[in-house]
Image: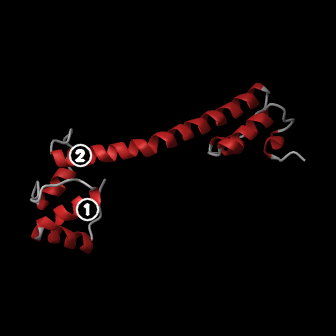
Amino acid sequence: MSVMQSSQHDGLVKTFIDRPQLAVEILRDLMGVDLPDTPLIHVTSMKEIMTSTDWPIQDPFFRHLHDRGLEAGLVEGEPKGRAEGKAEEAARSVLLVLAARGFDVPDDTRARITTCTDLTQLETWLTRAATAQTLQNLFNEPG
């Protein structure tokens, strides 16, 4: 991932180089990490460490940040991934029922079904797919 540098970025880096204690205080406040009063590393080497492709991260401070970010990503990503998986399976089920009933599903209809992420809507379509006389009946409200 590349970071576009700006004058604000450059100014912040210069400030941290000139006042490394400020960097420690900001990181302590923002990240909630208990840091020593002296910087663990000189600020100018942070870019090198952060852009390094050497894994695992050896520096304890950056290992902590990495692990914390990974944990936060898992907490957020797991339920999202589960919901996406349920929607994909529901869409697949709609298409399977339509195929089993002999419907030739055009690409635009297939796309509409497979891109839907609303599980309630997909379940409605699945129920309708079992009895619909036409593909249009799948999407029309019973009336």
Please tell me whether mark 2 or mark 1 is closer to you in this view: 1
CA gap between label 2 and label 1 equals: 15 Å
Going from the N terminus, do you reach mark 2 or mark 1 first? 1
Rendered image quadrant of residue 18: bottom left
Given residues 126 and 37, the one toward you in this image is: 37
Vertical comparison of 120 with 98: above or below: below
Rendered image quadrant of residue 125: top right
Vertical comparison of 85 with 22: above or below: above
Residue beneath the point at 9% across and 59% down: 38
Given residues 121 and 116, the one toward you in this image is: 121
Location of residue 93 in the rendering, given as x and y in whole percent from the top left corner: 68, 31
- Residue position for label 1: 29
Viewer can see residue 107: no
Q: Which mark is residue 80?
A: none
| Count of numbered circles on the image | 2
Residue beneath the point at 28% across and 61% down: 30
Viewer can see residue 68: yes
Residue beneath the point at 79% across and 27% down: 101
- Residue position for label 2: 64
Q: Residue furthest right?
A: 143
Residue beneath the point at 71% across and 34% down: 94
Label 2 Cα crowd, 10 Å radius (few <14 / some 14-19 / many 20+): few
Location of residue 50 in the rendering, given as x and y in whole percent from the top left corner: 21, 52
**Local SS, label 1:** helix
Given residues 51 and 61, the one toward you in this image is: 61
Given residues 75 and 128, the one toward you in this image is: 75
**Is residue 77 toward the left or the right of residue 18 in the image?**
right
What amino acid is labelled 2 in the image? Answer: His
